[in-house]
Amino acid sequence: MKRIISVLTVLSILLFSVSVSAEKLVIKGSTTVLPIAQKTAEAFMKDYPDIDVTLSGGGSGNGIKALIDQTADIGNASRFIKDKEVNLCVENNVYPVPHRIALDAIVPVVNKKNTVKNLSLSDLEKIYLGKVKNWKDFGGPDMEIVVISRDSSSGTYGVWSKIVLGKKRVTPRALTVPSNGAIVQAVASTKGAIGYIGLGYMNDDIKPVDVNGVKGTEETTKTGEFPISRALFMFTNGWPEGKTAKFINYVLSEKGQSLVKKAGSIPVY
């Protein structure tokens, strides 16, 4: 009798463990927001072990597309949603709700061997339109400028294009890369290169350049002194509920905002 009870107990435990599975939370989009999402997701899953978070990058456009296609619970974007994307949302019975989770500066970066320390917005426009092709024209070495940019689905590209280029086309000579990390690698390995990245990707392998004499920092972004800055967003389909609400609230909590800062971005609270 005792043996039968013991076997039944073991079976009930096994069946219970099989029936209980973690909820899945899928997050896709911006590579700028990705470090924030990674840090907060790691802490979140420790505090909520019953929820599994799956993360992927691919750019802001892909994050919002995943929201439209309903293949993600949260779409990360380093820019605001476009009118045409809102229309696609409505067509697919999706109601996009933006959640501002951080601030960021987009900082131009050059190779560490480049002596140029400051560029104006006008200088950057000339470089990215291909009107000036040598660093000596900006007081730097006699060296060809290698322009590195992001693809059009990138939110970072969208903000850069609007503020720096007035939405004009980047020079066809530009090397297009898919992520902030790829820009860091390309600039670090190419002497004449220039690129632009979010603050969270800054490291010692590259050199930041001031814009209009202002350094891109947390303080100058908050005060509005640094001219190339933006908000970072997480978009949800409607006002979030359940697991999605738990994660958004976690990111906006005191703990979550401290993780935003650790990720290299600027807390909103």
Image (cartoon, rainbow, N blue to C red):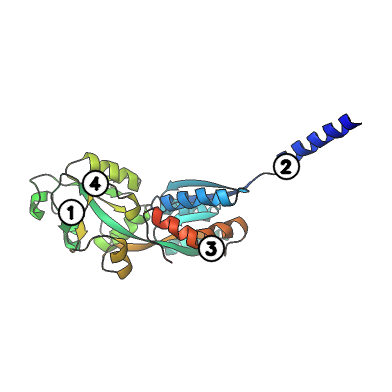
Which residue type does callout 4 highlight?
Ile
Residue denoted by label 3:
90
Q: Based on the displayed image, in which of its 4 quarters is residue 165 positioned?
A: bottom left
Dot 1 lies on which element? helix
Q: Quadrant of residue 156?
A: bottom left
Res 206 label: 4
Residue at image point 56% right, 58% down = 92
Q: Which residue is mark 1?
A: 127
Residue beneath label 2, please? 19
Position of the C terminus, as image quadrant, is bottom left
Pointer 3 or 1: first along the chain: 3
Q: Is residue 229 left or right of residue 238?
A: left
Choose the circle earlier in sequence order: 4 or 3. 3
Mark 3 residue element = helix
Above or below residue 111? Residue 253 is below
**Alpha carbons under labels 4 and 2: distance apart:** 50 Å
The residue sitting at 25% across, 43% down in the picture is 205
Query: Label 1 to label 4, Cα distance in Å?
Result: 18 Å
* Real-space Cα separation, disc 2 to disc 1, in angstroms: 59 Å
